[in-house]
Image (spheres, grey):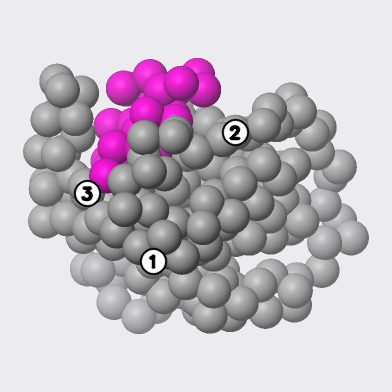
Amino acid sequence: MAKMELSNQDTVESLDADFAKMAVEVGQHAWGITALTMREKAFIFVAADLCARSLGFALQTHVAMARSQGVSVPTLQEAVRHLAPYVGYPTAAEALIVLAQLDDTGDDPETPPTATPHLELDTEVLQQIRLLDNDFGHFYHKQFVDRWGRPGLSIRERALATIATDVLNQTLGDSYALHINIALSHGAKVEQIRAVLHLVAEYGIAKTWRAFQRLNATIQE
């Protein structure tokens, strides 16, 4: 099978030939993971870029790759909206500025995903949050309902992208477990969750190590 040509590969090679070889190998490994769809990989990479505040070259590269695989600019914008509470609204705003500068007139129209079912936050989780601080509990609940119930991405796609934010933010407690359970309840398998961790390892290999430890513990609980 022919190797995938990465977006902006020539630019990386012009900066540092040795690093370019490493980066291309990592990129080809990531995009070649078969457990995830190309759409899912696109959203996961956008999530990773936002967590790392890599809103220049990295985000532009992954957006270009996503568009080459049929993901439209409006769909990427919806991914950023979903991720805003998890990466920070200021960072999401900067990412939307980048996306707003793109010409999407050549994008092929996408087939909308199956209608997103209503997703309510687990009552036990909500109670635990409200016990910490009632006002924060109301804020969290509204953010959850508003973001997870929007059209444009499936719940599985949203969950996998949000798991990436947990890995890179190292929020590996209740938040991580919640998002893993949502993914598993909406069509994902453990194989897909492991693939998310493999995908974001290039953003922090030690963070991924710890995330695998917690994932294994969560699955066994």
- The residue most toward the right is 105
Q: Label for residue 51?
A: 1
In this orientation, which residue lies closer to the viewer: 163 or 39? 163
Does residue 27 lie above or below 41 as drawn? below
- Main secondary structure of the magenta stretch: helix
Earlier sequence position, callout 3 versus callout 2? 2
Q: Position of residue 191 (x, y in %)?
A: 32, 22
Which residue carries the number 2 mark?
A: 119
Does residue 98 lie above or below 26 as drawn? below
Earlier sequence position, callout 1 versus callout 3? 1
Please name the amino acid that badge 1 sits on. Cys
Please name the amino acid that badge 2 sits on. Leu
Which residue carries the number 3 mark?
A: 172
Q: Position of residue 204 (x, y in %)?
A: 21, 60
Q: Residues within 10 Å of mark 3 (few under 14, many from 20)?
A: many
Residue depicted at 36% across the width and 70% down the height:
52
Which portion, as a residue range, is magenta?
174-200
Q: CA distance from mark 3 to mark 2?
A: 22 Å
Judged from the image, the secondary structure of the residue bearing numbered disc 3 is loop
Earlier sequence position, callout 1 versus callout 2? 1
In this orientation, which residue lies closer to the viewer: 177 or 133? 133
Q: Residues within 10 Å of mark 1 (few under 14, many from 20)?
A: many
Judged from the image, the secondary structure of the residue bearing numbered disc 1 is helix
Q: CA distance from mark 1 to mark 2?
A: 24 Å
